[in-house]
Image (cartoon, grey):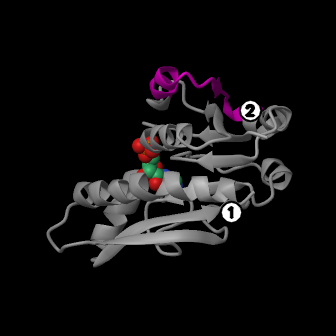
Amino acid sequence: MTKQIAIFASGSGSNAEKIAEYLTNIPDVETTLILSNNPKAGVIDRARRLHIPVLLFDRTTFYESNQVTRLLQAQKIDLIVLAGFMWLMPSELVQAFPDRIVNIHPALLPKFGGKGMYGHFVHEAVVAAGETESGITIHYVNEHYDEGQIIFQASCPVAPTDSPEDVARHVQKLEHEHYPRIVAELVAAM
Ligand code: GAR
């Protein structure tokens, strides 16, 4: 049976696109749906180009109804992939998909994680702390920001002269290199 993947993204969606493209070359796996909380997110145009349906939802629907969970269950989603999704997953959704939700964080957790640590804030904090390396963490999602079990990490050096934008570029390269493959491996193991 074809495995169904749903991707959540709030922003540009470069990771979502890389994952969806990668999965088109894997037999019996389909990116069924892209979900976003942000009607202006770049991921929406990317999804259109890839002919993947998009579901937009607001805060009330996400946190005060179980509509999103019910839809994911009705579509028989096997794996939920967070790719730059900036809202905490509601516990009812986490409980409905145990060990079936993964996230990517643009740093080496447990460092530089938690509420407010996302996107460029992470790279700014890494540079401000004088870190000599940063990287990516792919992990399972639980009810707390960035705390689920770690699946994979990869690191890159941070030079004393690197700006947050430099770090962001190195980290994004790692994300695009590894996230699609790790998602495919997780699906293959299901
Ligand atoms: C990625 O760097 C991802 O790691 C980060 O948002 C970016 C999304 O980029 N996620 C977080 O900070 C989550 N805490 P993209 O929209 O181009 O894929």
> Gap in Å between the C-alphas at discs 1 and 2?
19 Å
Looking at the image, the residue that sits furthest to the front is 27
Disc assigned to residue 144: 1
Q: Is residue 92 above or below residue 123?
A: above
Residue 182 figure quarter: bottom right
Quarter of the figure with residue 58? top right
Residue 61 visible somewhere in the drawing: yes
Near-viewer residue (126 or 73): 73
What amino acid is at disc 2? Thr
Q: Quadrant of the N terminus?
A: top right
Is 48 one of the magenta-colored residues? yes
Are circles 1 and 2 on residues that touch, CB within 8 Å? Answer: no
Horizontal placement of 131 versus 61: left or right?
A: left
Residue at mark 2: C-beta within 8 A of ligand 1: no
Residue at 84% in and 38% down: 73
Percent across and percent down for residue 142 are: 72, 61
The disc placed on residue 110 is none
- In depth, the one of 161 and 27 nearer the eye is 27
The three-letter code of the residue at mark 1 reads His
Residue lying at 29% horizontally and 70% vertically, measured from the top left: 128
Q: Which residue, given by chain and number where applicable, does mark 2 sit on?
A: 60
x, y percent for residue 6: 66, 39
Bounds of the magenta segment: 44-61
Check if residue 75 falls in the magenta segment: no
Residue 100: image x %, image y %?
A: 74, 55
Q: Is residue 103 visible?
A: no
Q: In the rendered image of this protein, does residue 121 appear above or below residue 112?
A: above
